[in-house]
Image: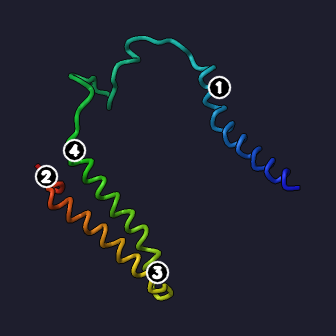
Amino acid sequence: MQVNEWLFIGIMFVIAAILPALPIIVAQLLRPKRPNTVKLETYECGIETVSEAWVQFKVQYYLYALIFLIFDIEMLFLFPWAVAYNQLPLFAIVVMVVFIAILALALAYAWRKGALEWQ
């Protein structure tokens, strides 16, 4: 009886793999194949590229994105905690205070190192 349950889960995994792969494979087989140099050129917004297509971005963009992501995830953890604040034991409150303290220390470290300074 238990083997049938696992068989059903295995069949669902196979179907889950086949459904997205099948249209991709069919498109690969049926598409027209006429490669040329014009199709391989960089194209952006209908304007032909004038110089090198690869541009280096400042590290500050990535640092701001990472800091935003960290605090966004912090809000993800804080919201359910704040909703259930009245029903939480003391241990849960201490754990969340430690979590907020660690993130505050990380922000202070980044601030002190000058990672938040725009140059």
* x, y percent for residue 73: 39, 63
Question: For the residue marked with disc 2, what is the amino acid?
Answer: Trp
Task: Estimate the spatial distance between the alpha carbons at disc 2 and disc 3, rounded to whole Å.
Answer: 36 Å
Residue occupying the point 32% across, 28% down:
46
- Nearer to us: label 4 or label 3: 4
* x, y percent for residue 88: 48, 84
Question: Which numbered disc flags the more N-terminal residue, 1 or 3?
Answer: 1
Q: Which mark is residue 118?
A: 2
Q: Residue furthest right?
A: 1
Question: Which numbered disc flags the more N-terminal residue, 2 or 3?
Answer: 3
Q: Residue furthest left?
A: 119
Mark 3 lies on residue: 83
| C-beta proximity under 8 Å, tags 1 and 4 | no
Question: For the residue marked with disc 4, what is the amino acid?
Answer: Val
Question: Which numbered disc flags the more N-terminal residue, 4 or 3?
Answer: 4
**Helix, strand or loop under label 4:** helix
Residue occupying the point 50% across, 12% down:
34
